[in-house]
Every structure is written in structure tokens, then in C-alpha cells.
Amino acid sequence: MTTTDPVSTTTAPDPGTPPVSVRREALYFAVRNGKLLVGATIVGIFLLVGIIGPFFYDQSPMAYVGQPMLPPSAEYPFGTNTFGQDILAQFVYGVRSTFEVGLLGGGLAAIIGMLVGFVAGYRGGLVDEILNMFTNVVLVIPTLAVLLIINAYLGIRSVAMQALLIGLTSWPWAARAIRAQTFSLRGRDFVDLARLSGVRTGRIILREIAPNMSSYLFMTFILLFGGSILIASSLDFIGLGPTDGVSLGLMLNHANQWSALMLGLWWWFVPPGIGITAIVGALYVANVGLDEVFNPKLREL
């Protein structure tokens, strides 16, 4: 991540957005970075499938529409499962649920991580020690084990509740990373000038520090997004996913539960497996590309 110090003036600076030249430079390298383009394209395709797919393919994912165990055909492009349900319909709605969990869970984790990281890094002292201790406690807790216990005994199992639990348990590493970046920025001249001008702490963080970390924060969110999808898919696969819908992880769970592999129903488990792998893999590839775009030392000229 690179930072740009605003030009010192007699009043507090206002670097709300990066200079035009910096944005143009980032855009120049972004459209020429193969990793970023490939990753963003794959994620965009699956996102479109999840958003507009149900409007064009309005078959209910839970409806019994045909003969069981039909292979892919013109009528059923992804075939049917052992219950005669349309696998393409389940895939389309499953992609939507997967993105919902990633967005809600990753977004919540990013918000908590930013709040804790910004406050701890900027305030320092006792506040930093308390928040850092709390972060370390949550960090060493076996997240998946806790989620397994909570999901197993929780009466409400929905996409929103799953995302909430994931978001509340996956923020510590982001908080520590943001804290370190904030700690390195709080001693810059433009931050000192804003502090001497009487600007409040919250305003300094939002208008002076956060804009200089925008690229780093965005990449952190992408990692949290992909991590939320992986955790949710793991819970779904072992049968602790939402009970009121369908997801790619639940498709794999049902395929495993009803012996799709032994029956040769490859069209039941291959699409959701490819979907999860492609989405998460593309997110991480795009994140590597963004790192190369924002970090001049990693750029391929």
C-alpha cells in the first residue's frame, strides 16, 4: 500500500479522495494487470448469475420437476438429483446465497476490524492494550469449533444468522493488520496538523487516515469476503447450514448424503464444487492483482 501526504498548509488538510494523478495511475495499471482482470471477470460472471439468474430461470430450487437422476440435457442443463429437483435452479439460487453470506459476513468482520484497528492504532496506550488483548483472545479461539457448537444448538439457522456469526468471529486478524497500518500513519505531519487544529479523533480517522489506507482496506475486505464464503461452505457441507434455503455448500452436503459419487451423478456435485472454488480462487487472484496495482514495488512494467 502506498500513501500520499497532503501538502502542508495553515489549516487542516482534507485528503478525502486521492489526487487525480494517483487515481489515474492506479487505473492505468489496473486495466493492464492480468490477475486482477481475470479474477474480477470470474467473480463478476458468478455475481451476475446470482443476481439476474433467478429472474431468467425462475424454476423453484426445491420443486420436483422431473424424473430423478436425469443427466444434463436441453431441458435440464445441469440434470436432476435423486429427488427429481432441477440442479441448475439450485445452483443459481445457491450462488446468490453464497454471495449474500460473503457480503454480510465479510462486511461485518471488516467493520468490526476497522473500528478496533483504527481506535487501537490511533489512540495507543491503555486503549490499545485493552483492545489488543481482546483481539488476541478472540484470535486464539478456534473459530470453526465455536461456529459448529453454536450452529448445532441454535434454533435459528438462516443465511443472515450464519453471516452474523461468521462476521463476529473472523475480524481479529483484520483488526491487527489495520492497527499496524494506523500506528504507522498517526505520526505523519498531516495527522499532527489536524490534531493541533482541534479536529476530533473520529474525524481524523475518517478524513486523514482512512483515505490513505483505502486500497489496503479494500483488499482486506476481499480476503474477509472469500474467507466468509469458505467458512459458510464448510458449515453447509457438514449439515449445519441454513434450513430455509439452498447454497452451494448445501448442494455438496446433499450430494454426499445421497451418495451422488457412488451413483455416478457427477452433475450433482461438480457444479457447486467448481462454483465455490472459482469464486474464492478468483477473489484471491484479484486481491493479488490489486496488491500489484497499489504497490509500485510489485508492478510488472
Image: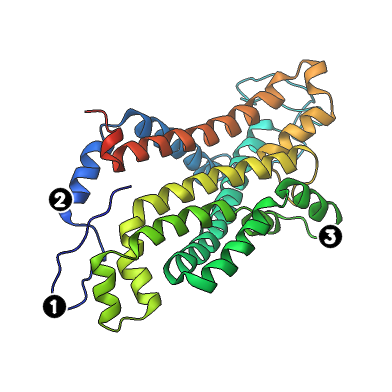
Q: Nearer the viewer, residue 250 or 233?
A: 233
Choose mark 3 or mark 2, whichever is in front: 2
Q: Position of residue 247 (x, y in %)?
A: 67, 42
Query: Which residue is under mark 2?
Result: 21
Query: Which residue is under mark 3?
Result: 155
- For the residue marked with disc 2, what is the amino acid? Ser
Element marked by disc 2:
helix
Q: Position of residue 63 (x, y in %)?
A: 75, 40
Work out how far the residue at label 3 is from the one at label 1, CA to CA, in angstroms.
Answer: 59 Å
Q: As drawn, is 191 to the left or to the right of 76?
A: left
Q: Nearer the viewer, residue 13 or 285?
A: 13
Mark toward the start of the polypeptide (3 vs 1) = 1
Residue closest to the far front: 125
Query: Which residue is under mark 1?
Result: 10
Residue at left 70%, top 44%?
246
Mark toward the start of the polypeptide (1 vs 2) = 1
**Which quadrant of the structure image shows residue 194?**
bottom left
- For the residue marked with disc 3, what is the amino acid? Gly
